[in-house]
Amino acid sequence: MDRRPITVLDPHVANQIAAGEVIERPASVVKELVENALDAGARRIEVEIRGGGKEYIRVSDDGAGIPPDEVPLAFCRHATSKIVTAADLSAVSTLGFRGEALASIAAVAEVEMRTRTPEQLEGTLYEIAAGKPKGRSPVGAPPGTTVIVRRLFFNTPARYKFLRSDAAEKRHVADVVARLSLARPEVAFRLVADGREVLVAPGDGLLASAVAAIFGPQSAREMLAVQFEMNGLSVSGLVGKPALHYGNRDRMCVVLNGRFIHSPSVIRAIEKGYDTLLPPRRFPAAVIHLECDPAAVDVNVHPAKAEVRFRADDTVFRAVHRAVRRALLSANLVPGHSTLDDTPPRPHPSEKGVAPAPLPYPRAQSPGEGRTPASEPAGKSESAQGEWTVVRAAATGKTAVFREESAVRELAPSWGADGSFEAGRTGSGTRAAPGVGAGEESGGREILRRMEILGQLHRTFILGETPGGLWIVDQHVAHERVLYERILRDGGPHAVQRLLAPVSVTLPPARSGLAEQYRDKLEEMGFLLEPFGGTSYLVRGLPVALSSPDPSRIGQLLDEVLSACEAEGRWNPHRLAAAVACRSAIKAGQVLDRTRMAKLVAELSECENPFACPHGRPIIIEVGRADLERRFGRH
Ligand code: ADP
Ligand code: MG
């Protein structure tokens, strides 16, 4: 690999570099040393720490190494091989360029470097502590560089005091190494903490492999590829399906030209891409790689180079938002049944008081669950028309009989005993095989269009046969999504139903000012309000979509929407649409006949996003055919 000699930067250039302390904690040492290894072209990097890195940090690489006479120079301030002139600063392509990291680390710790270039027969050992060189000597060493940092901040007790517990510092180190390996999937990483292997990324060049190593293989399988280009900016990476969500942003990572960056605006763009697909205050898994001309970004704004400035910030925002949105919408976003295994269903905000419907089929590993379908040979029998199989719903103990070819032929009487299954009998007999193979079909919308409705389950779910298995549609959230999109689309005066007898509502004092402020906006969406003295209003009209408006609820609805807009500091029509949709949608427990179910599924298939309700809850769950076959021991 081509390397330029290390030289001390001209003070004029050095002065143009964002100043500030880069070494705050063990993780910053690790970050700087690993970045140096990456800049040296390493293919394998090993990090070892002890005591959270406060006691000991070792970073070894198989990169270019440093020639013996340049080693002491590497530890001088503003000594770097990466830039020479101020002009170089405007298009930095390496991770480092400040020439300060080694000097800063050596100033506050005991440092030992062993390094050898491939041309040299012998390596160099160099030691330095608290900024004072201890000597340089030849040493046997493999090509590459190993830096050991001991007793970080031993000479600066005030800074040592700011360090957190070993466990917390170790977490920071692991986070940094994880992000670096997500940034560079072509490099193999290994992190060992107190003798235990914490992270191993294979370095096979596939982002999916790095993601599997860091987030776990299960999560990696739930990620979708992103690929998009706009105005010379390429956006690629992997984003989690909406069913994969977390309580914090730890699994969101932004990489720009191979450097992981802290970019609130890109993070916001990713989150906006998910829009209503995630529940409130839940965050996706996403690794986004941005590639652009280095001249289009300024990396020289933050001493630790963690922040960058895009010269065209809004292009980046729009490109990332679109890239993520496209990936999510073009993929089949129906959460796999595996979500049933680990995520207990949460009561929906609009369904407080309605008992959650039982799970439609046994959980994979419920404790004390002896009666798996596969262990019920008595329930499975051959018949002349084909093979029949029995599924037992663990929660209810009820069974359904499926015929293997595809259509549900009959349902055991016990299902209907409580009257919950009147629409369940299809008697459809044999029918043509569906025209789409699950493998060829990426658009879930198309599957919805062609789905054969099998019936209603527990007056709550619509069951449909699809090429890939069984789809279970939550009737309430499905309808909620349909209404939500309709309200946003069809707002305007024609969407108003004038009330024969106006209803008076009284808002809490804190909201009435807002009702005044947003009166026009409310009117656009169908709420005709007329001041009625104090904090009271006469409601003369309501959105058409608001079915059977209950006067006592209107005030509550307005209060909810206005307080959400107040919290956001702006008018947000989505809030209003979601609130109206939520109240007007078909409820769980409502019997739907076949025509109504078919209509709802058809309307859902026309939605921009048929797969998550405005609150982010899934609308459809799939029980895969392969999974059914596996559970019945067919493979
Ligand atoms: P910078 O990375 O900003 O140039 P550093 O203080 O981190 O500054 O490193 C100084 C110089 O030491 C680098 O420019 C590079 O030439 C050399 N160097 C540091 N670490 C390594 C390494 N692991 N392998 C090869 N060269 C290195
Ligand atoms: Mg560096």
Image (cartoon, helix red, strand yellow):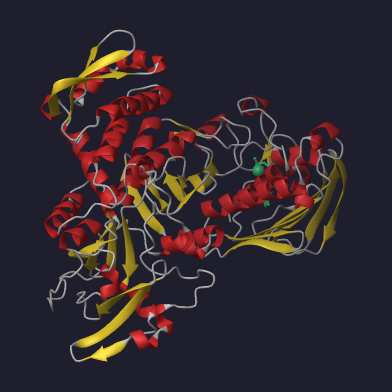
- The quadrant the N terminus occupies is bottom right
Inspect this view and state whether residue 473 appears.
yes
Vertical comparison of 174 with 464: above or below: above
Q: Farthest residue toward the front?
A: 418
**From this viewpoint, is residue 439 visible?**
no
* Residue closest to the eye, 25 or 456: 456
Q: Is residue 201 left or right of residue 73?
A: left
Closer to the camera in the image, 11 or 48 = 48
Dividing the picture into quarters, in which one does residue 106 lie?
Answer: top right
Which x, y percent locates residue 556? 34, 27
Q: Position of residue 398 (x, y in %)?
A: 35, 72
Position of 148 relative to 133 (above/below):
below
Residue drawn at x 39%, y 52% is 355
Q: How many marks?
A: 0
Query: x, y (%) of residue 383?
Result: 23, 90
Viewer-proximal residue among 247 and 401: 401
Question: Does 537 sit left or right of 272 as displayed?
Answer: left
Q: Which residue sits at x=20%, y=34%? A: 546
Considering the image in quadrants, where does the C terminus appear?
Answer: bottom left
**Viewer-proximal residue, 583 or 115?**
583
Please tell me which residue is depicted at 79% across the width and 56% down the height of the picture.
124
From the viewer's perspective, is residue 504 above or below residue 580?
Answer: above
Task: Please tell me whether residue 541 is drawn above or below residue 417 in the rendered image.
Answer: above
In this view, which residue lies farthest toward the right? 134
Quadrant hosting ligand 2: top right
Image location of residue 471, percent across then percent down: 28, 63
| Residue located 14% across and 24% down the image | 499
